Image (tube, rainbow, N blue to C red):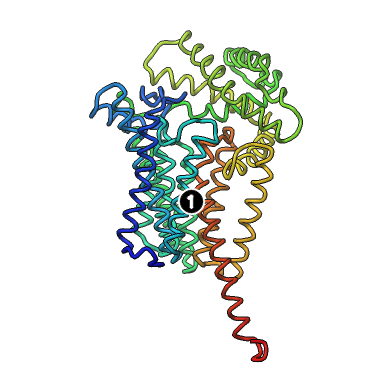
Amino acid sequence: MNKKFNLSDRVFQGLLLMVSILFYVFFTVLDGAVICVDSPTYISMSLAREPVYPLYLAFFRLVFGDGERYLFAAVFVQGLISAFAAWSLSGFLTKEFKRTRIDNMILLAVPLLVSLLCKFAAKRAVMYSNSIMSEGICIPLFLIFARWLLEYCFRKNEKALIISAILSVIMISARKQMLVTVVLLVLAVLFSELKKKNWLKTLGKACIYGVIIFLCVSGIDRGYNFALRGEGVRHSSGDRFLLTVVFYEAEREHADEIEDSEIRELFLEIYDVCDESGYLGNSAGDGWYNRVDHFTNHYDKIQIDTMWPMIREYVNANMTGSEVELEAEIDRIMDVITKSLIGKEAIGILRVFVDNVFAGLVVTVAKQRKILVIYAIIAYSSMVLLWAWNWKKRGFRSRENILALYTAVSVLLNVAAVSAVIFCQTRYMIYNMPLFYMCGWLLLRAAWELRGKRKETEVENAPERCR
């Protein structure tokens, strides 16, 4: 590495870590803990939430007591995790790609700048590390996961794969969206091991890791609810996301598909409120951008403001029981409506999915604005060209190609997972934004390096009179 600063690598990395920590600590002190719409459900340890983040908050509440102190402590640690994640991934990539200290500083700046975009450009006025939401820990853990899974892909280090699996369990137990990490891990195993041509062993290894992760996630979920509620059940309300999309595309006459008369009447009550308020897809304008904008602006109004509270009100009015029993009945009603209507609305749901995929790709690298759609097309086109150039010159299993392949798969998986059940807002797409731009920088540097080597070769091979 470049010794321009006359510092040992260890001291230099220590300074970068300090810069990263000071960056996040500054904004933690400036903004403090920020309560968001979803925060009360985490704080109250709602059955609808996965266990890890409520337990994370409960730990600080146990240590610091109720009030603002424990929330500030929680976001302070979230800032430290974010600082470590940015530093760890940037340092790892610098080392693996044998880049200079200047490159290291640029790579570290990428996740820091992404955090600033969340505060100043996404109209949130606060970074996710300061928010009482599961994103506060999952976004940095996703970067740390990428660092270790990439190490496994580069070096076939089994320890790195085990660490990746542990991180996957933690993240899935914090938010279901992180199921994409299981797919990434399984694909990494297949990619790294298949060249040995032992298909059965490789497939078995991938399946074993996948099964162990799911068993651990289920065990944590059930164990948490058994300790808290006396019943070993999974968290509730998992169907509400898909049901929201079902409502969005539904027509009133679709109610005939619901055999249970009481649930049918409940569906019609919810539908009429949403329809009269202009929340449903039949009120969307023409064109992709208008459809996506309408879906984005009305998704929460369907689910949070109308559907979920009306179903909950109906259940509370018609039965008594424990929290677990009431939530189970809510889940049953949502499941009945979803299964009854999803076939009828398959084409409409597919259209929403496709619209969301394009929106998700845009939001992964920018913001959902008409001018930024053009920027996103340029950004992805540039990335593909750089990837193709490096693939051609360095080969399929080069580090540059593996990084680009991992980034592309990670982006597509996350976009597809979110697009299937919800709208693609920044908080769901931002997971891959730092990696996208870090990958872009490394591909650009590699391409520039190859260009320089080509010129040297041309000079060496030129006739003597041309030199």
Residue 171: image location, x then y, percent: 40, 41
The structure residue drawn at horizontal position 69% and vertical position 36%, both measured from the top left corner, is 351
Q: Residues within 10 Å of mark 1 (few under 14, many from 20)?
A: some
Q: Going by the picture, which residue comes out furthest to the top?
A: 317
Q: Secondary structure at mark 1?
A: helix
Please state which of residues 35 and 155 is positioned toward the viewer in this rendering.
Answer: 35
The structure residue drawn at horizontal position 45% and vertical position 45%, both measured from the top left corner, is 112
Q: Quadrant of residue 73?
A: top left
Indicate left or right for 408 with 82 as reference: right
Residue 31: image location, x then y, percent: 40, 30
The structure residue drawn at horizontal position 62% and vertical position 19%, both measured from the top left corner, is 259
Query: Image height check: is 357 above or below 51?
Result: below
Please state which of residues 272 and 451 is positioned toward the viewer in this rendering.
Answer: 451
Q: Going by the picture, which residue comes out furthest to the right?
A: 286
Please tell me how many numbered marks the rendered image carries: 1
Residue 290: image location, x then y, percent: 71, 31
The structure residue drawn at horizontal position 66% and vertical position 14%, both measured from the top left corner, is 272
Query: Image height check: is 21 above or below 235?
Result: below
Q: Quadrant of the N terminus?
A: bottom left
Q: Going by the picture, which residue comes out furthest to the bottom?
A: 464
Please state which of residues 262 and 352 is positioned toward the viewer in this rendering.
Answer: 352
Please state which of residues 375 and 420 is positioned toward the viewer in this rendering.
Answer: 375
Judging by the rendered image, the residue that carries numbered circle 1 is 184
Residue 166: image location, x then y, percent: 35, 47
Q: Quadrant of residue 7?
A: bottom left
**Kind of residue at badge 1:** Leu
